[in-house]
Image: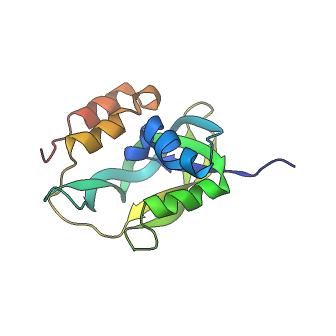
Amino acid sequence: MTERLVWYFAYGSNMDPARLAEDRLKPRGVALAERIGGRLEGWRLVFNKRARTPVGSGAGNIVPAGGAAVYGTLNAMPAEGIDVLDVWEGVAGGHYERRLLPVLRADTGAMVEAVTYVALLTGDDLRPTRAYLGHLLAGRDLLPPDYWEWLKATPTVD
């Protein structure tokens, strides 16, 4: 019997393959089956998810925005991987909510339904830390060069 795989769209720190695969999934016995680039149309990346420390820092979030697009990684994994990510993303505590959204595969242009997370605890005038932004930049292998450069130029709190 073949295990059912689901797509997860990462636009924030889980674009870092080491963070997602090695730090979060592997310790719980979950392996990624595939990792490719993806594009979410009609949304924009912001850093308005309140982080614990330092003061004024924000994590990645997506907000609806006509004409915009968010680039990230599409990650195929067993459904149990989404349960693991729910814990990391603080779904039970009301930090993020799980959403199922259509994402374009960069390799084929086909649309797939992918799980992603939208923040519930947001604030204004927040910026990512350099360390957090580094996790996004680690997705460089699957991001368009101009998007990666835009991310790299993001002001940080530190």
- Residue 50 location in percent, x, y? 25, 63
Q: Would residue 7 be visible to someone looking at this image? A: yes
Compared with 120, 144 (above or below) is: above
Instruction: Name which residue lies at 61% across and 41% down.
Output: 32
Instruction: Name which residue lies at 49% across and 49% down.
Output: 24
For the residue pair 41 and 120, the one nearer the viewer reads as 120
For the residue pair 129 and 109, the one nearer the viewer reads as 129
Q: In which quarter of the image is residue 53?
A: bottom left
Instruction: Name which residue lies at 34% across and 56% down.
Output: 61
Q: Would residue 103 be visible to someone looking at this image? A: no
- Residue 95 location in percent, x, y? 37, 68
- Residue 19 location in percent, x, y? 43, 41
Quadrant containing the C terminus is: top left
Q: In which quarter of the image is residue 125?
A: bottom left
Which residue is the extreme one toward the right?
Answer: 1
Instruction: Name which residue lies at 38% across and 32% down.
Output: 138
Compared with 117, 149 (above or below) is: above
- Residue 91 location in percent, x, y? 45, 69
